[in-house]
Image (tube, rainbow, N blue to C red):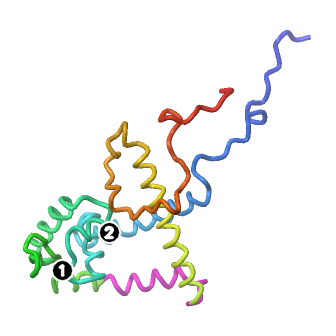
């Protein structure tokens, strides 16, 4: 008889641990990654960085938008938008004008040149949208977008809670928690790590 001890199959005997990132959320994260890749391709085609392209796309949704509003929309610092907008202004792609009622506020708007360049992508984007939403009838598409908006707000609240929980050790982790629109009336679950005050699980 062999003296070698039989070792259990670790793959079979290991506890059934849930993936840290839920499969549903992983699908959403994957969609976001693919969309960013598409925008990166569009940005490169126009000779822009991804950030510059995102800024132009955001401005195409409204004219004369304040820098702080654009920064909140893109989830970046206002100083970053200021620097990028100055670079785009030099290229003749947008206008920077002070607000008529408050000279401290700078409003951004696209130039005719920017509209022409973005217009070249409209037909391609329309074809992509048609392919992506091919199986969606108009009511279904509207309902789907509404559900995504709800998910966005809830994920934003979780992000806000995570930022609050790591304040003692990371000085808000670099996030602007005041702009999240968090409401304590719908409090998300605690997302702190065990090292930040939650009891660690027993038994390994």
Of pointers 2 and 1, the one earlier in the residue sequence: 2
Left or right relative to 113: residue 147? right
Q: For the view shown, which residue lies furthest in the front direction?
A: 185
Instruction: Classify 10 Å Cα crowding around label 1: few (below 14), some (14-19), many (20 and above).
Output: many
Left or right relative to 111: residue 49? right
The C terminus lies in which quarter of the figure?
Answer: top right
Which quarter of the picture shows residue 89? bottom left
Left or right relative to 105: residue 70? right
Q: For the view shown, which residue lies furthest in the bottom direction?
A: 138
Q: Position of residue 48 (x, y in %)?
A: 23, 67
Judging depth in this view, the residue of 180 and 58 nearest the camera is 180
- Residue at image location 22% in from the left, 77% down from the top: 65
| Element type at mark 1 | strand
- Marker disc for residue 79: none
| Element type at mark 2 | helix
Judging depth in this view, the residue of 140 and 49 nearest the camera is 140
Residue corresponding to mark 1: 109
Give, as a single range, the part of the protein colored magenta: 121-138
Residue corresponding to mark 2: 73
- Residue at image location 32% in from the left, 72% down from the top: 42
Magenta segment's dominant SS is: helix
């Amino acid at each position: 008889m062999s003296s070698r001890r039989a070792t259990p199959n670790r793959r079979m005997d290991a506890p059934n641990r849930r993936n840290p990132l839920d499969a549903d959320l992983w699908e959403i994260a994957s969609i976001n990654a693919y969309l960013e890749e598409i925008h990166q391709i569009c940005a490169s085609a126009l000779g822009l960085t991804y950030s510059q392209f995102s800024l132009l796309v955001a401005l195409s949704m409204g004219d004369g938008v304040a820098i702080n509003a654009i920064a909140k929309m893109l989830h970046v610092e206002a100083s970053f938008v200021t620097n990028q907008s100055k670079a785009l202004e030099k290229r003749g792609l947008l206008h920077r004008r002070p607000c008529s009622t408050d000279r401290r506020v700078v409003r951004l708007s696209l130039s005719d040149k920017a509209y022409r360049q973005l217009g070249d992508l409209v037909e391609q984007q329309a074809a992509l949208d048609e392919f992506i939403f091919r199986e969606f009838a108009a009511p279904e598409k509207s309902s789907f977008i509404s559900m995504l908006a709800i998910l966005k707000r809830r994920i934003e609240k979780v992000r806000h809670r995570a930022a609050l929980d790591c304040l003692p050790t990371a000085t808000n982790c670099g996030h602007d928690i005041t702009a999240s629109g968090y409401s304590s009336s719908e409090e998300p679950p605690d997302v702190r790590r065990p090292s930040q005050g939650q009891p660690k699980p027993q038994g390994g």
